[in-house]
Amino acid sequence: MTVWELFKLDGKVAVVTGAARNLGYDMALALAEAGADLVITSRRLAEARAAADRIRGATGRGVLPVEMEVTVETQVEQMVETALAEYGRIDILVNNAGNVAKSTPETAPFERRALEAWSEVVAVNLTGVFLCSKHVVARAMKPARSGNIINIASTAGVVGKDRRQYWDTGMGGATLDYHAAKGGVISMTRDMAAYLAPDGIRANCISPGGFWRNQPPQFVERYNANVPMGRMGQDGKELKGAVVFLASEASSYVTGHNLVVDGGLTAW
């Protein structure tokens, strides 16, 4: 088998949550470009349909859009049943859906953080990964005795954040709940890998660093100063290779790994 063949996903079916935009869209597109058919989810069906049309037009692959809230177990169960009815299998699950509860410089500090904000962030970023993995494993991967779970965490789950980057920007900044949830995703991935390996299922994690989202210039300058490569991540390429590597036979002996994609931020 050549190295190019190792990266092919022909005949595979991938579910990507939160795939209507940004990194979720990039990863879904990459998997389709590598040959996989897709189920992509969003809380807004119109956005999922628009993304599906774009990916289908660019790749010619099957792309099924589904409206789903990852914190509602009945919706997760229905998504899995819909995927199986359409394709008969789920080989790859990318748990990308996540959020950062809106915050201000007054509400972001954890001594003033509202319980409701904490609960919302943990529910989407951590509980949502649990629910989607639970039902995909139970209905599709364990019966097939094969599968591949890729959880999207963050460098926020690896290191603390220097809040001085947010001074005078008007941004709320990093929150303790987001760091806690993403750290939980990394730890959960490692135990998933240990638990599921006897069933032929791999589980890995990707932890992106900061990506450019038109943030205030002073924040971008301060952030870049803390990155050895001197820049933020760029949409359209930075995670595409990472997700295809972990989804394919190119990483067949890799499980329980946290692949950090951060320009070296966590290296120093």
Image (cartoon, grey):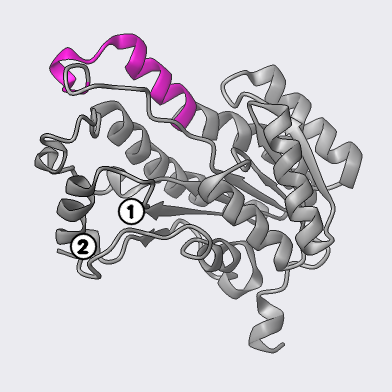
Which contiguous range is marked in magenta?
Answer: 108-125
Q: Position of residue 181 (x, y in %)?
A: 36, 32
The residue drawn where x is 40% and y is 24% is 121
The residue drawn where x is 42% and y is 60% is 234
Mark-to-mark CA distance, 2 and 1: 9 Å
Q: How many marks?
A: 2
Quadrant housing the N terminus: bottom right
Q: Secondary structure at mark 1?
A: loop
Tell me which amino acid carries mark 2.
Answer: Val
Q: Position of residue 91 (x, y in %)?
A: 73, 53
Report which residue position mark 2 lands on. Answer: 227
Label 2 vs 1, first from the N-terminus: 1
Can residue 262 be seen here?
yes
Tell me which amino acid carries mark 1.
Answer: Gly
Q: Is residue 3 magenta?
A: no
Report which residue position mark 1 lands on. Answer: 209
Left/right of residue 89 with respect to residue 14 in the rendered view: right
Q: Residues within 10 Å of mark 2 (few under 14, many from 20)?
A: some
Q: Quadrant of residue 73?
A: top right
Residues 261 and 257: in front is 261
Q: Quadrant of residue 56?
A: bottom right
